[in-house]
Amino acid sequence: MQLALYKYDTCGYCRWVMQTISELGVTDTIELRDVLREPRFREELFEARGRGTVPVLRIEDESGEVQWMGESRDIVAWLKERFAG
């Protein structure tokens, strides 16, 4: 499974998700894609979702199927369900 978080540093919702990632100890598991520093990441969001709002978690399973999760509450809940002790 490949995970990527689309975010930017001054986004409060992104910081909440990032804090959860840090608390769960999975910072090495999730690629961080800053949409303000790398315009191609923002373009990827527009192509996939029709908008560039963040945070968004891109989840690619072993078969190559991609899911885009765009609500910070949903992302945090999914991360805790997947990675919490």
Image (spheres, rainbow, N blue to C red):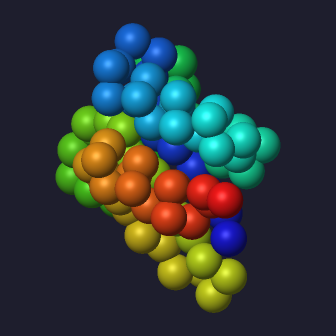
Nearest the viewer among 45 and 18 is 18
Q: Determine the residue located farthest toward the front in the rendered image.
A: 85
Question: Vertical placement of 14 versus 20: above or below?
Answer: above
| Residue 38, horizontal then vertical, whole percent | 54, 26
Front residue of 24 and 47 = 24
- Res 14 quadrant in image: top left
At a point 70% along the width and 46% down the height, the residue shown is 26
Q: Residue furthest top?
A: 10
Point 39% across, 56% down: residue:
77
Quarter of the image with the C terminus in it: bottom right
Q: Position of residue 43 (x, y in %)?
A: 40, 41
Residue extending farthest to the right is 28
| Picture residue at 62% right of the left edge, 35% below the top | 23
Count numbered badges in the picture. 0
Residue 41 appears in the rendering:
no
Residue extending furthest toward the bottom = 63
Is residue 15 found left or right of 71 in the rendered image? right
Q: Position of residue 9 (x, y in %)?
A: 47, 16
Q: Is residue 4 above or below residue 66?
A: above
Q: Residue 54, image x and y in percent?
A: 33, 36
Query: From what the image shows, is residue 56 above or below residue 38?
Result: below
Front residue of 12/82: it is: 82
Screen quadrant of the N terminus? bottom right
Inspect this view and state whether residue 36 appears: yes
Q: 6 above or below 14?
A: below
Q: Quadrant of residue 16?
A: top left
